[in-house]
Image (tube, helix red, strand yellow):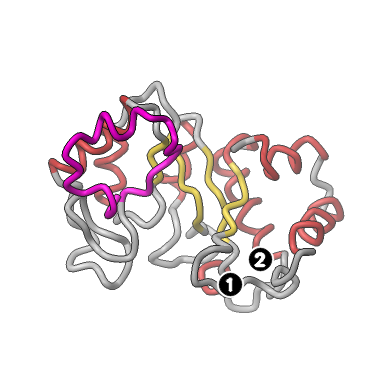
Amino acid sequence: GHALEGCPDLDRFLAGGTITRVTLVHLIDCGYGPTSSPLSRNTEAPLTDAGRAFVQALDRSRTLVDLAHIGRRAFWDAVDAHDRALPLVATHTGVCGVTPHWRNLDDDQIRAIADSGGTIGVIFAQNFLGRPGGPRDVAMVAEHLEHIVRIGGEACASLGSDYDGAIVPPLGMRDGLGIPRLVDHLLTKGWPRSRILAVLGGNA
């Protein structure tokens, strides 16, 4: 969203169909609203009027509204401003039900995205996924996927990697075999093939 602030003809720009999703905010606040990051001036600030109009413009162009990174109050403001006939997404995040963290979604937020028909991608960042005494390998990702499935249903869970971000992945996910190792772990835990295929890309 930061990159589109002040775009003189936003509807025309989005109408091209080349942009499939937009994250409303990133690691700092912008004119649309606050980040959940400690760098925010006020993480509990509302979505601005410009932010609400931005959500509606994204909806008009059928561009996915990505609620990763956004402050909690602004998250709910975006849900309220959003066209309920369209899905919401959080493309790369963890969940507070496993690891309470400013970057992660709580159960009510998971349900809101699931109820919209959207999906939540689990980030591969060990600092957002890890918990005291918990696993340090691909099982970190599996725990968050399992919680999303438990709260939001099988159609809500996806992979969100963030391999292009400044992250440190769990052990075993730092090379090209990370996804196969995760699949092997989920099979060992008894996940059905259909659920694994959904998480690997079907849900997205």
Percent coordinates x, y for residue 94 in the rendering: 52, 59
Q: Is residue 84 left or right of residue 174?
A: left
Q: Is residue 123 left or right of residue 110?
A: right
Q: Is residue 10 magenta?
A: yes
Q: How many marks?
A: 2
Instruction: Residue at 43%, 53% (x, y): give it.
Output: 106
Instruction: Residue at 81%, 61% (x, y): give it.
Output: 181
- Residue ranking furthest to the left: 49
Q: Earlier in the sequence, mark 1 or mark 2?
A: 1
Write down the region rendered in magenta. Answer: 1-24
Vertical comparison of 162 with 90: above or below: below
Vertical comparison of 18 with 96: above or below: above
Instruction: Residue at 23%, 35% (x, y): give it.
Output: 10
- Residue ranking furthest to the bottom: 133
The residue closer to the viewer here, 45 or 179, is: 179
Query: Dot 1 corresponds to which residue?
Result: 126
Rendering quarter of residue 140: bottom right
Amino acid on which disc 2 is placed: Met
Query: Dot 2 corresponds to which residue?
Result: 140
